[in-house]
Amino acid sequence: MDSEKIRKKFIHYFEKKKHHFVDSSSLWPQDDPSVLLTTAGMQQFKPYFMGGKDPVKDFGSKRLVSVQRCFRTSDIESVGDATHATFFEMLGNFSIGDYFKSEAIEYAWEFISHEMGIPADRLWATYFEGNTDVGADHEAVSLWKKYLPAEKIIGYGRSDNWWGPAGSSGPCGPCSELHYDFTKQPCAKKEKCLPNCECGRFMEIWNLVFTEYHQNERKKLKPLPKKNIDTGMGLERLALILQRKNNVFDTDLYSPLLHIIKHDANFGCINAYEDTVRSRIVADHIKAAVHLLSDGVTFSNKEQGYVLRRVFRRALDQYQHPHFALEPLVNRIIELYKSHNPLLQSRHNRILESVHMEIENYSKVLQSDISEIIQKIKNLPKKSNADVQGPSSRSLTAQEAFTLFSTYGLSTERLKREGFVFDEEKFLQEVENHQKISRAGAEKKFGGHGLNSTELSEDQKKIMTRYHTATHLLHQALRTVLGDTVRQEGSDITPERLRFDFSYGSKLTDEQKKAIEDLVNQKIKENLLVTSQEMPYDEAIASGALAFFKEKYPNSVTVYSINGFSKEVCGGPHVSATGEIGNFSVISEKSSSAGIRRIKATIK
């Protein structure tokens, strides 16, 4: 069964069960600062699970089904084996305060065994065996006994059978998994070979999450207003079984890409095994990069842009020659996925331009003398040499390795190939610390815009308050005109003008600038009421408020709303109604950095 048929049969089955189909959301979660990228199908439904939004009002149903594009880097070092990938599609069905465990297990069994025809003797189930916070899930065990013998229903702890939250806080709960048994024969590694054994006999295919709790940032649980169902099944793994392959890379989701890679004269040759792993890494990482680019992520050294650059350059590092003929591969990815992600087609040229530019930038780095660069950074001030591994001249501190990446663009894989060693865990700490500093600086600018400065007169503070409110109108106008992938990247206000940085991949046309300016002035003319409300951070996000920085917010935040047009977590202050702002004029629009545009505007 080809992957397209699997997608259609999954959607059709759940539509027959009165589920409403919802398109995949972006890999770049625009309104959820608790996560960097979309890692699960339920992420776009978090506000509904938490009671902040009504699914019946928005979708006409409490039952939903989706095929969600997902991106995870937690297993990036395992990409190239039989089952792991950074980009994958998640088949999911969801119940928001409607059905619960009984129906979820019944639907899963019926779809897998009847619709997909997978033999029952190949299936096992697992359940949450309980801990000090939540008891064992005896109900799930009882429900699975309708379909499986007791000896094939196995209990595990929180590390295996508890899901969530997706981010530092959010919905979560115990889960029950279906596992596929490839061999039906125990391995020699353990006395009892059961699901989650690392021998390769079993593969998890479907995770049924019984979302009953909300976990806050202090990891405390409280019951959700309603019990929900969130399930996820990897399309690639299901295709592996149904297409009778030994690994996901032999399925029709990867084989057309691997054909192109293996026939690329620039790919080089090491040995059969390493070539297989390297070609799989290229196929997965380039596919992931193309989807990130389609969703508006741009190459950079921070946050989503850092992840994009990391996977893209890691793919380039699999080549043995400095020339990367990736355009045919990119084109094939777009062709394969354009019906499921229309942005791939509409942004085809922009994606290719970004890819060519990044290849050129990386090629310049690789053509430079790495030893000379190393010598330069070795002369930089260091925090400590405690993380140098061994006495070799090829040893680097984590700080040096990070400088090579952030300043010179050398990936960690390239450094390792050149024979350099460093503490990778401490390197990741350097990345995280760098991001915290960047976000803190941005938050400082965004939150108050210097309005508490004693150097400002009262008149200056009043006009800057008008400018501050204008940035909210401008931000929403940009998202309305250019699309909701637009995201604020910085803001600065003086008594003379506002400056607003936002994510967008190309220069604005005169028509776009006029439409944005006209929309802001229209909302000013309507004299919309500006209100504020204190609420818990999670409730603010669930209500649809935008927030922009990934640092930990306080438990209670202020949400400023402009009468249905704009809603943001913000430090204020603001005018009481938009009519107080005055006439808004865009005076310039230009590039600030790669993928970031900058608008300057005045009000009179």
Image (cartoon, helix red, strand yellow):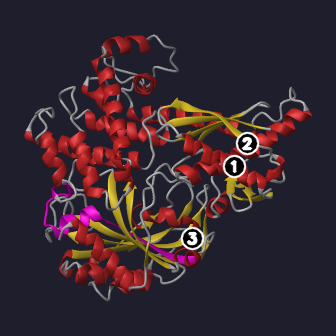
Q: Is residue 258 above or below residue 340?
A: above
Q: Earlier in the sequence, mark 2 or mark 1?
A: 1
Which structural element holds mark 1?
A: helix
Where is residue 356 drawn, in percent x and y? 31, 33
- 523 or 463, nearer to the observer: 523
The span picked out in magenta is 226-250
- Find residue 178 and report its image quarter: bottom left
Q: Earlier in the sequence, mark 1 or mark 3?
A: 3
Residue matched to label 1: 520
The N terminus - image quarter:
bottom left
Q: Residue at x 17, y 29 (%)?
A: 320
Q: Is residue 500 above or below residue 96?
A: above
Say what amino acid the circle numbered 3 marks: Tyr
Distance in Å between CA atoms under marks 1 and 3: 30 Å
Query: Is residue 281 within the magenta segment?
Result: no
- 554 or 256, nearer to the observer: 256
